[in-house]
Amino acid sequence: MSLLEDFIRYIQSEKRYSSHTVEAYLRDLIHLSEYLSSVYELDDFKQINTNILRSYIVSLKEQEFKNKSINRKLSSLRSFYKFLLREKQIYSDPFIGIKSLKQPQNIAKFIPINDINKITFDTESETFETCRTQLIFEILYQTGIRQNELRNLKDTDIDFGNAHIKVLGKRNKERIIPVSKVLLEYVKKYQKQRDTLFENFDNFLLLSNKGNQISKTLIYNTIRDTLQHQTTLKQKSPHILRHTCATHLLNEGADLLSIQKMLGHNSLQSTQIYTHNTIEQLKKIHKQAHPKG
């Protein structure tokens, strides 16, 4: 088995990375392998050194990769070479002296609460599709879970008695998220419509019109159509509701640690991007309310 295959098996079985992450790591390593072969005529990852890595970064810049994309690739490669060190396939780290590239501080975009309050659903027409659209939007906005986490929600993950849902996040880590009684009523309403249409289906909560597990595309289109005329933001994706949920919680006084646990972030640093939104909100309030604002 090759070093690359060993590494992929390691991050799948021991690190328990998601299939999406594994695919990204594999692409990054194949890209590096192609560079080594074409530029240096090397066919062995172990032959790399710091100078070659620097030339690889330069080539990525010349190909107009953004710093964020380059840093993500470097993160994959660092993990691979740490693995090689651990397995004693190499005895020095080629990444010593290689630093991540500077990138602009991102401020997470979110939908203002006034725009959220404008969104309404046709409650009189309680069709399967209408109930599903409302439930998709409300779960994403009220809980801040990821699109893939929503896809994989099962009926058994909904605890009506204790008013929470169980979510299987990245690296198969479970977390419990409290939900409102109103949201649970949306779940019951949707399940009633779903169960009249489909008799035999997998235990997934959200189904397509054919009774299969809902697709990412359907979730994306549902949110895009729901937000189409309600916000001026260009981004109208499920992920914008994750940002919106976190920002609104923070603006209403929730602490960062609680939001981190709710979102399933591994580090508090990932959650801190939402503090910039709070600062912007404070600036806006100061400008409007202070006599010399």
Image (tube, helix red, strand yellow):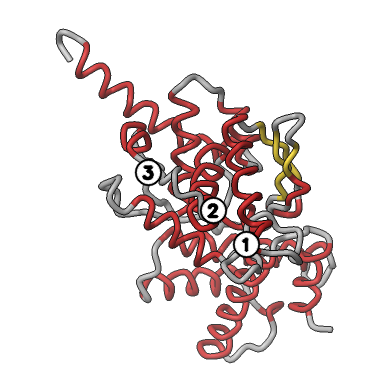
What residue lies at 69% left-to-right and 84% top-to-bottom? 44
Mark 3 vs 2: CB contact within 8 A: no
Relative to 269, say whether 92 is above or below. Answer: below
Give the mark toward the camera: 3 or 2: 2
Q: Say whether disc 1 or disc 2 marks the residue closer to the N-terminus.
A: 2
Mark 1 vs 2: CB contact within 8 A: yes
What residue lies at 27% left-to-right and 19% top-to-bottom? 285
Mark 3–mark 1 Cα distance, whole angstroms, equals: 29 Å
Could you say whether the residue bearing mark 1 is in a helix, strand or loop? loop
What residue lies at 44% left-to-right and 30% top-to-bottom? 248
Dividing the picture into quarters, in which one does residue 144 lie? Answer: top right
Given residues 167 and 12, the one toward you in this image is 167
Image quadrant holding the N terminus, namely bottom right
Kind of residue sitting beneath label 2: Arg
What residue lies at 79% left-to-right and 83% top-to-bottom? 2
Relative to 284, say whether 137 is above or below. Answer: below
Rendering coords of residue 204 (x, y %): 71, 58
36 sits left or right of 279 in the view:
right
Q: Say whether disc 3 or disc 1 marks the residue closer to the N-terminus.
A: 3
Location of mark 3 (residue): 109
Mark 3–mark 2 Cα distance, whole angstroms, equals: 25 Å
Location of mark 2 (residue): 132
Kind of residue sitting beneath label 1: Leu
Given residues 123 and 232, the one toward you in this image is 123
112 sits left or right of 241 in the view:
left
Could you say whether the residue bearing mark 3 is in a helix, strand or loop? loop
Kind of residue sitting beneath label 3: Lys
Crowd around label 2: few <14 · some 14–19 · many ≥20 (10 Å): many
Rendering coords of residue 52 (x, y %): 55, 75
Location of mark 1 (residue): 207
Image quadrant holding the C terminus, namely top left
Mark 1–mark 2 Cα distance, whole angstroms, equals: 8 Å
